[in-house]
Image: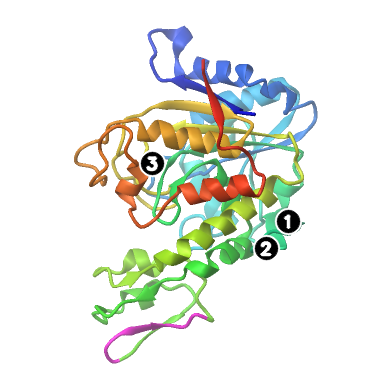
């Protein structure tokens, strides 16, 4: 049976056809009222954006959806988890400051801000999954304890999983720091033979896992937390990822996503925003130009179906010139492989379907 995915484009020719009104109609068409019921604590899971990034979901859109949840009598809170890497969201104090700076304060978002894994990422609950890579996963305590969840995802590219959408938002976004480390464990960076011994990686490593030798830098993998700070700061591209490790990495993400919603059967809804479709995750401290035009907004109760539909809609577009997209510009060609040719994001969808998270077979219903 095909999963239903509701879609609206962005054509607006009046106040009754604004993006705000379209969001309201999507919410109603997908019958999300059945999920967000009276007095239920509802986690509105989103990404507040790293400081310097500006492609995260518009807080005005978040407010519309929060108001719809409140109308049902539910009790929403805006939430995310602290990051493994050391940036502007590594602890709750910095994370809240960044969220408020980006417009997610109570007066705009309409709901309290809660960083779900605690002050330093140590508030988590073990959820049994019994899958290929993990028997249990470490889900942020306040997300696990919530009654229902509305998952709002900015759909975009990603250098390690090909794309980022609902599944990644659940996987990394709902895991506490130790869970993020478990997912990244198989994807630690390595230093190639071109190392110029400049020392930038040493300075950027938050756990002092890199030492300079006479002719190269050396990573102590017992200390490495796979935050990949060094990958981003190396000025000579001397640090790389093991691309063969990306498939198990995506499988591990799928298993964590499964754990994030396991104890909320029929209590989770997903909205993907296909706007500002950039090459990178909103975790980076910049926003590159989009590689395809804005497309629309999707709603579903199936995370696999909504990501599959989003992936397909992006690939139906013509790629934008002068973007990071170097090939696969024609409609129908895989734009994400045009960005990150070493990563096949379809593997994430295949494995998520295999472990029962949802179906890649969907029906797109235009609203």
Q: Name which of mark 2 and mark 1 comes first in the sequence.
A: 1
- 364 or 193: which is nearer to us? 364
Q: Quadrant of the N terminus?
A: top right
Mark 1 element type: loop
- 3 or 18: which is nearer to us? 3
Q: Image quarter for residue 361?
A: top right
Left-right relation of 287 to 117: left
The residue identified by callout 2 is 134
The answer to whether 71 is drawn above or below residue 318 in the figure is: above
- 78 or 29: which is nearer to us? 29
Q: Residue furthest front?
A: 1
217 magenta-colored: yes
Mark 2 element type: loop
Left-right relation of 220 to 357: left
Q: Position of residue 29 (x, y in %)?
A: 61, 17
296 magenta-colored: no
Q: Name which of mark 3 and mark 1 comes first in the sequence.
A: 3
The scheme the figure's colours follow is rainbow
The residue identified by callout 1 is 129
Q: Position of residue 303 (x, y in %)?
A: 59, 38
Q: Image quarter for residue 36?
A: top right
The answer to whether 129 is drawn above or below residue 153 in the figure is: below
Magenta segment: 214-221
Residues under numbered marks 2 and 1 in contact, where contact means CB atoms less than 8 Å apart: yes
Give me the C-alpha separation between circle 3 and circle 1. 35 Å
The residue identified by callout 3 is 54
Identified at 42% across, 49% down, the residue is 281
Residues under numbered marks 3 and 1 in contact, where contact means CB atoms less than 8 Å apart: no
Q: Name which of mark 3 and mark 2 comes first in the sequence.
A: 3
Give the prevailing secondary structure in the magenta stretch. loop
Q: Position of residue 6 (x, y in %)?
A: 55, 23
């Amino acid at each position: 049976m095909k999963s239903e995915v509701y879609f609206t484009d962005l054509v607006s020719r009046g106040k009754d056809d604004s993006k705000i009104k379209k969001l309201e109609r999507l919410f109603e068409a997908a019958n999300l009222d059945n999920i967000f019921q009276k007095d239920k604590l509802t986690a509105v899971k989103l990404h507040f954006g790293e400081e310097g990034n500006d492609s995260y979901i518009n807080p005005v859109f978040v407010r519309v959806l929060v108001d719809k949840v409140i109308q049902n009598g539910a009790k929403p809170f805006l939430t995310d988890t602290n990051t493994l890497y050391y940036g502007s969201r590594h602890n709750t104090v910095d994370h809240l400051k960044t969220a408020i700076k980006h417009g997610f304060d109570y007066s705009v978002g309409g709901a309290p801000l809660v960083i779900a894994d605690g002050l330093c990422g140590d508030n988590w609950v073990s959820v049994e999954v019994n899958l290929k890579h993990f028997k249990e996963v470490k889900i942020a305590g306040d997300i696990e304890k919530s009654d229902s969840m509305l998952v709002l995802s900015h759909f975009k590219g990603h250098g390690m999983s090909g794309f980022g959408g609902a599944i990644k938002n659940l996987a990394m976004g709902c895991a506490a720091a130790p869970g993020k480390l478990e997912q990244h464990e198989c994807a630690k960076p390595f230093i190639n033979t071109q190392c110029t011994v400049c020392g930038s990686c040493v300075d950027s490593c938050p756990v002092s896992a890199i030492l300079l030798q006479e002719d190269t830098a050396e990573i102590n993998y017992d200390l490495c937390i796979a935050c990949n700070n060094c990958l981003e700061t190396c000025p000579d591209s001397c640090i790389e990822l093991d691309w063969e490790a990306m498939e198990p990495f995506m499988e591990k993400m799928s298993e964590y996503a499964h754990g994030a919603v396991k104890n909320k059967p029929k209590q989770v809804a997903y909205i993907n925003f296909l706007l500002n479709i950039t090459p990178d995750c909103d975790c980076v401290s910049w926003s590159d130009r989009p590689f395809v035009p804005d497309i629309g907004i999707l709603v579903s109760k199936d995370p696999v179906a909504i990501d599959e539909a989003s992936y397909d809609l992006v690939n139906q577009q013509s790629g934008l010139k002068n973007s990071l997209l170097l090939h696969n510009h024609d409609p129908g060609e895989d734009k994400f492989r045009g960005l990150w040719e070493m990563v096949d994001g379809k593997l994430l969808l295949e494995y998520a379907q295999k472990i029962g998270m949802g179906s890649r077979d969907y029906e797109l219903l235009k609203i």
